[in-house]
């Protein structure tokens, strides 16, 4: 039994050859699960070369059809030989599946469904192109939005954090934020594990700095309670998103390019935007991340002195990013972007310094970005589901995979994005 998965005109196309019996069906089932991205809505199964089919194989395709139907898409089967067609007819499934004579006809039927969904979205919000991606913008709140900075980034980067520098924050007060923090039964319990953290829609995900590089997370079921997030440094959003965008990029758009697009869009609309905050739910085309290896507390200060990102210290302190991964999985992220090419003098100088002093990622667009993201699996992308409902689905239904500080080269295939144009930045 052989199986080959590829994308033709953006449609997942799977060719199966040989005997699809009980044993091979499990292999095909696993292969389909590995190939199916969270943003796939339709798929084509090519039976050319399939010589044998049993009920076990039929059940695999029934499961895929049910999955795609739930996403608003279709399953198209093509090039069905004489014996597999006889099996489908005898089992009563020749009328359950959509069967086409050729791959071209099956792709046309699948694309017709995809195009109809895109057309509906285009009519609701006409698309514009930035950085090779298609953006659809919709208005949000007109109220001003601010960022609230707590803690000293300089102390964090030089591993000078003490207990008195750490804030204990209620989950109800930190809907969207990022920084360095930890959970624990007390401040003393949390201090040794301070690591990269993000709070999104009232949930917290963080990487305990215990040497295992394995993220942990907490999703409160209700407001209130005694559990606190201990943060050595945090940047939190105060206010609602001013605009929402839907982004589609077949080849993927990097975070760096996405922020450039946001700033370009603001200039086109003559919106004052030197600092923006962005939240997104989407599908990643390649996740690139890093994290700190140790809690940035005084006991762990670099032996050589200086900052944890100095060349002589960085390998000991900063996790090596590695190759991009998790392509096709869902990602939820929150971040801050600064454009140093515009006048930023209206912002509080000290608070602005706490943002602009952060080490840059891998982008080359001249922007200063700070983003943290969480990867989930098995949360189908839906163009019609708004940002925060999509985030809630990830938190409630998704298979948690990973969390990291996102590098600027991280790619996004599709996303719903909330954009806040920051009016003020406060410190304390």
Image (tube, rainbow, N blue to C red):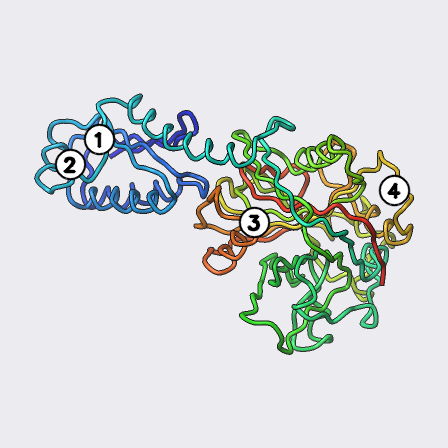
Which residue, given by chain and number where applicable, does mark 2 sit on? 94
Give the side of residue 106 with respect to residue 347, left or right.
left
Q: Which of pointers 3 and 2 indicates the residue nearer the eye?
A: 3
* Gap in angstroms between the C-alphas marked 1 and 2: 8 Å
Q: Residue at (80%, 38%) from the top-left corner?
A: 339
Q: In this orientation, which residue lies closer to the viewer: 252 or 243?
A: 243
* Number of numbered discs on residues: 4
Q: Position of residue 366 (x, y in %)?
A: 79, 33
Q: Which mark is residue 387?
A: 3
Q: Earlier in the sequence, mark 1 or mark 4?
A: 1
Which quadrant holds residue 55?
A: top left
* Gap in angstroms between the C-alphas marked 1 and 4: 60 Å
Q: Can the viewer see residue 290?
A: no
Q: Earlier in the sequence, mark 1 or mark 2?
A: 2
Q: Earlier in the sequence, mark 3 or mark 1?
A: 1
Q: Which of pointers 3 and 1 indicates the residue nearer the eye?
A: 3
Q: Which mark is residue 99?
A: 1
* Gap in angstroms between the C-alphas marked 3 and 1: 36 Å
Determine the secondary structure under disc 1: strand
Q: Which image quadrant: the C terminus?
A: bottom right
């Amino acid at each position: 039994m052989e199986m080959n998965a590829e994308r033709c005109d953006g449609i997942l196309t799977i060719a199966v050859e040989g005997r699809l019996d009980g044993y091979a069906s499990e292999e095909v089932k696993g292969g389909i699960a590995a190939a199916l991205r969270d943003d796939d809505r339709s798929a084509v199964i090519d039976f050319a070369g399939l010589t044998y089919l049993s009920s076990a194989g039929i059940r695999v395709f029934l499961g895929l059809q049910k999955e795609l139907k739930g996403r608003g898409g279709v399953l198209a089967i093509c090039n069905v030989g004489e014996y597999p067609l006889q099996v489908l007819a005898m089992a009563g499934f020749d009328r359950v599946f959509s069967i086409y004579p050729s791959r071209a006809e099956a792709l046309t039927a699948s694309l017709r469904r995809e195009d109809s969904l895109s057309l509906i979205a285009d009519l609701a919000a006409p698309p514009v192109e930035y950085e090779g991606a298609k953006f659809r913008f919709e208005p949000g709140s007109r109220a001003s939005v601010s960022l609230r900075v707590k803690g000293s980034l300089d102390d964090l980067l030089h591993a000078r954090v003490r207990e008195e520098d750490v804030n204990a924050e209620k989950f109800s007060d930190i809907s969207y934020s990022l920084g360095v923090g930890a959970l624990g039964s007390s401040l003393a319990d949390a201090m040794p594990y301070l690591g990269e953290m993000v709070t999104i829609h009232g949930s917290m995900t963080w990487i305990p700095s215990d040497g295992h590089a394995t993220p942990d997370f907490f999703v409160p079921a209700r407001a209130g309670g005694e559990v606190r997030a201990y943060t050595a440094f945090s940047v939190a959003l105060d206010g609602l998103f001013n605009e929402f965008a839907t982004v589609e990029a077949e080849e993927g758009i990097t975070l760096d390019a996405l922020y450039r697009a946001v700033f370009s869009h603001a200039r086109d609309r003559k919106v004052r935007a030197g600092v923006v905050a962005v939240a997104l739910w989407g599908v990643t085309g390649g996740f690139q991340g890093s994290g700190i290896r140790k809690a940035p507390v005084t006991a762990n200060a670099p032996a050589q002195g200086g900052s944890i990102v100095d060349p002589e210290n960085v390998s000991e302190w900063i996790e090596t990013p590695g190759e991009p991964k998790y392509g096709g999985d869902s990602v939820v992220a929150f971040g801050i972007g600064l454009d140093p090419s515009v006048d930023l003098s209206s912002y509080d100088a000290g608070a602005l310094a706490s943002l602009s002093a952060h080490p840059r990622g891998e982008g080359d667009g001249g922007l200063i970005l700070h983003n943290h993201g969480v990867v989930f699996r098995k949360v189908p992308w839906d163009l019609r589901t708004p940002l925060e409902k999509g985030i809630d689905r990830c938190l409630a239904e998704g298979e948690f995979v990973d969390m990291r500080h996102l590098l600027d080269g991280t790619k996004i295939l599709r996303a719903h994005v909330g954009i806040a144009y920051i009016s003020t930045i406060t410190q304390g």
